[in-house]
Image (cartoon, coloured by chain):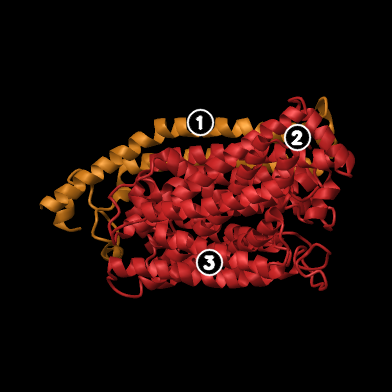
Chain colours: A orange, B red
């Protein structure tokens, strides 16, 4: 561990990585060990997985039902409107809802942490430049 | 019933010329004026989220999807709606899963985004090759479709005239890409999407009015006119000829879902946003617009069948590519006033503009990748002026072969080419993007395996699928080499693409993937939070 690293991150325990891995790494401070980044990583991961799996899951279910449960999908709910078509058209408002929900949660859970990390790295970069 | 009146034709011709002139002028005015690469490739992120969203939607809704999806809805009903929904879902998944990290990791091209962690020429060249392989078929479809569509709208027949149209308009599309760069084409995309959605919405409203605002009546009338009765309103009409119709339907739609939004001409618009939050806003606009378009095209497609019958639509074009236009005209009723002729001209002009804009966007994506990933990395420190000239020459280098090929394929069924694009997107690009953005141990050989192996699998399987040969509507109706009884190759190649990436990573050994993990952690703040402004 170089002394420069201690100056930049005095609050962190020194790295214990094997030396050759450290040599290959770029000169920037390793952001991956920040706890903020860990929080952001899991927030993003949760958000992404839930959103993606829900959307994909619903659509796959719709396709499977269309293919393998024709009797359910053709039973008429209203006059001239089979269940299948209704489920299909329902996806339009559901999509809009999903986008709104995604934007809302991202703004609340992800953006503040990302902003903090960006700020932190800017400060780091400035310090680095000043040295 | 499938010919338009002389009045409408004359008006369309005037409108097309006007649109071609105005858009070219707009490109010249808004194109980059200095030798600034950032301006040419991304337009400096100068677009507001709403405009960027419009441009994304514009790039995403290509002419092939308007005309093709409209046709499938008119001919197959329910299956067509499923296809349209897959298209919308694909863009939504792009928003949820890839858009923000892609914006943070990439700079100009897909090669940039992927090579962020694993620098090297081989990666960039592979990315460029897959970019071109995935977009070239789509460009061919639209270029060849241009000739057919103009012949249909303007009412001329004659092969040489159609070929002339393809060459002339192809030249126009190349100039959009070369002169306008990202910003110029964005403007055209915005113009196009506004026109397409605006005219489409009005026609859809007129259509609903003819059925007394009752969607149920519309569906019933369409089913009655479809020739297949109530089967029109359930799954299965599209894939009746297939030996595994249900499995074929599911894999086809999922291939569109995974492949559609991963195509490089869509992902390149992610890099033009200024921040992750902006990209999210832009995507919200884009997805909303595409979903709205699903509604519009559903109403027009069903309306076309309900008003003029499936047989007439299939007679005008076996794939139903003209259904959108036929439906739009039928919505006005038998007596067409001047105002209605004007409105119909707007619809045809919107389609014309869609053709121009989508090919221009695709040429731009290929040219950027060729110039930035392949040529600019060959020379150390290429000057910005040279790279920009190179990008413009690349537009020519991509566009001219595309035009020539399009004149060769224009009389064949173009459906397999569209499918080929989506399969490449889903089997090579989607796994490569997902792995390289989220999997820390993913190595360079894993990436190369994904890109090359996934594409090779698609290219090997594709000639054996249903649409290429073996049936009267296939591209080669006289031949029969149909040994893979599905419409798309997705059932095999998508899992294969992901498996190749995993296998390549495992084979490259523990050390390499540990190293990659460190590399990834070094750039993770960058990819997730957009920390450390991207340097040259």
Task: State whether discs 3 and 1 lie on one chain.
Answer: no
Subunit of mark 3?
Answer: B
Residue B142 lies in what quarter of the image?
bottom right
Q: Give the spatial CA distance, label 2 vs label 1.
A: 24 Å
Q: What is the quadrant of residue B455 in the picture?
A: bottom right
Q: Residues within 10 Å of mark 2 (few under 14, many from 20)?
A: many
Q: Position of residue B441 (x, y in %)?
A: 44, 59
For image coordinates 58% across by 43% down, the residue present is B196
Frontmost residue, A6 versus B324: B324
Circle 3: element type: helix
Label 2 in the same subunit as label 3: no
Residue farthest left in this picture: A131
Which residue is labeled 1 in the image? A100
Q: Which residue is mark 2?
A: A85
Instruction: Write down the residue under mark 3.
Output: B132
Q: Is residue B503 visible?
A: no
Give the side of residue A91 with respect to residue B366, left or right: right
Disc 3 vs disc 1: which is toward the camera?
3
**Label 1 near label 3: C-beta < 8 Å?**
no
Q: Secondary structure at mark 1?
A: helix
Report the quarter where the C terminus of chain B lies. bottom left
Subunit that carries the residue with mark 2:
A
Viewer-nearest residue: A23 or B456 = B456
Q: What residue do we see at 45% from left, 30% from top?
A: A104
- In this rendering, do the residues under marks 2 and 1 share a single chain? yes
For the residues labelled 2 and 3, the Cα–Cα distance comes to: 37 Å
Sequence-wise first label, 2 or 1: 2
- Can you give x and y, in whole percent of width and height, for residue B86 in the image? 65, 45
Q: Residue at x 59, y 73 (%)?
A: B404
Image position of B228 with respect to A87: above or below: below
């Amino acid at each position: 561990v170089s002394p420069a690293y201690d100056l930049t991150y005095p609050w962190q325990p020194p790295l214990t990585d094997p030396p050759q891995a450290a040599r290959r790494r770029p000169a920037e401070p390793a952001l991956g060990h920040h706890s903020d980044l860990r929080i952001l990583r899991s927030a993003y991961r949760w958000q992404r997985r839930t959103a993606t799996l829900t959307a994909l899951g619903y659509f796959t279910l719709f396709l499977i039902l269309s293919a393998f449960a024709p009797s359910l999908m053709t039973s008429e709910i209203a006059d001239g409107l089979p269940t299948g078509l209704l489920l299909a058209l329902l996806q339009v408002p559901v999509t809009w809802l999903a986008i709104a929900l995604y934007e809302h949660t991202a703004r609340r859970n992800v953006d503040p942490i990302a902003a903090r990390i960006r700020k932190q790295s800017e400060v780091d970069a400035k310090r680095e430049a000043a040295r | 019933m499938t010919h338009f009146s002389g009045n409408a034709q004359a008006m369309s011709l005037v409108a097309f010329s006007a649109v071609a002139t105005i858009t070219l002028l707009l490109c010249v005015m808004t194109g980059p004026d200095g030798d600034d690469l950032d301006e040419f490739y991304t337009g400096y992120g100068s677009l507001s989220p709403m405009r960027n969203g419009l441009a994304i939607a514009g790039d995403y809704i290509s002419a092939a999807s308007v005309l093709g999806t409209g046709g499938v809805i008119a001919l197959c009903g329910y299956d067509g709606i499923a296809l349209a929904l897959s298209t919308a879902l694909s863009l939504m998944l792009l928003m949820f899963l890839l858009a923000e990290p892609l914006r943070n990791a990439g700079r100009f091209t897909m090669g940039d985004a992927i090579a962020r962690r694993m620098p090297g020429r081989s990666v960039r060249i592979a990315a460029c090759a897959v970019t071109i392989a995935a977009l070239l078929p789509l460009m061919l479809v639209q270029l060849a479709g241009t000739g057919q569509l103009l012949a249909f709208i303007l009412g001329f027949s004659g092969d040489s005239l159609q070929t002339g149209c393809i060459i002339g308009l192809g030249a126009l599309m190349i100039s959009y890409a070369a002169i306008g760069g990202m910003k110029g084409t964005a403007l055209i995309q915005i113009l196009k999407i506004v026109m397409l959605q605006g005219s489409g919405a009005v026609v859809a409203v007129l259509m609903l009015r003819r059925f007394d605002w009752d969607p149920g009546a519309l569906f019933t009338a369409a089913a009655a006119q479809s020739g297949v009765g109530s089967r029109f309103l359930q799954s299965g009409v599209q894939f009746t000829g297939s030996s595994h119709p249900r499995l074929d339907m599911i894999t086809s739609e999922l291939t569109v879902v995974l492949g559609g939004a991963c195509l490089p001409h869509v992902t390149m618009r992610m890099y033009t946003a200024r921040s992750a939050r902006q990209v999210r806003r832009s995507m919200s606009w884009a997805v909303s617009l595409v979903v709205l378009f699903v509604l519009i095209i559903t109403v027009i497609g069903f309306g076309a069948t309900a008003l003029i019958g499936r047989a007439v639509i299939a007679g005008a074009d076996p794939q139903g590519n003209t259904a959108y236009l036929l439906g739009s005209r039928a919505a006005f009723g038998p007596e067409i006033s001047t105002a209605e002729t004007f409105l119909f001209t707007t619809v045809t002009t919107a389609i014309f503009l869609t053709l121009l804009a989508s090919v221009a966007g695709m040429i731009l994506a290929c040219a950027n990748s060729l110039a930035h990933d392949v040529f600019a990395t060959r020379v150390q420190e290429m000057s910005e002026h040279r790279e920009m000239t190179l990008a413009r020459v690349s537009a020519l280098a991509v566009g001219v072969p595309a035009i020539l090929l399009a004149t060769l394929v224009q009389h064949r069924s173009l459906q397999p080419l569209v499918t080929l694009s989506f399969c490449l997107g889903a089997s090579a690009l989607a796994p490569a993007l997902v792995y390289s953005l989220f999997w820390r141990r993913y190595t360079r050989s894993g990436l190369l395996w994904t890109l090359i192996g996934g594409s090779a699998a698609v290219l090997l399987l594709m000639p054996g699928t249903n649409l290429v040969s073996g049936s009267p509507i296939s591209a080669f109706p006289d031949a029969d080499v149909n040994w893979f009884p599905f419409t798309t190759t997705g059932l095999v190649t998508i899992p294969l693409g992901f498996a190749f990436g995993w296998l390549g990573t495992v084979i490259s050994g523990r050390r390499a993937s540990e190293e990659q993990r460190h590399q990834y952690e070094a750039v993770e703040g960058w990819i997730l939070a957009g920390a450390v402004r991207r340097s040259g």
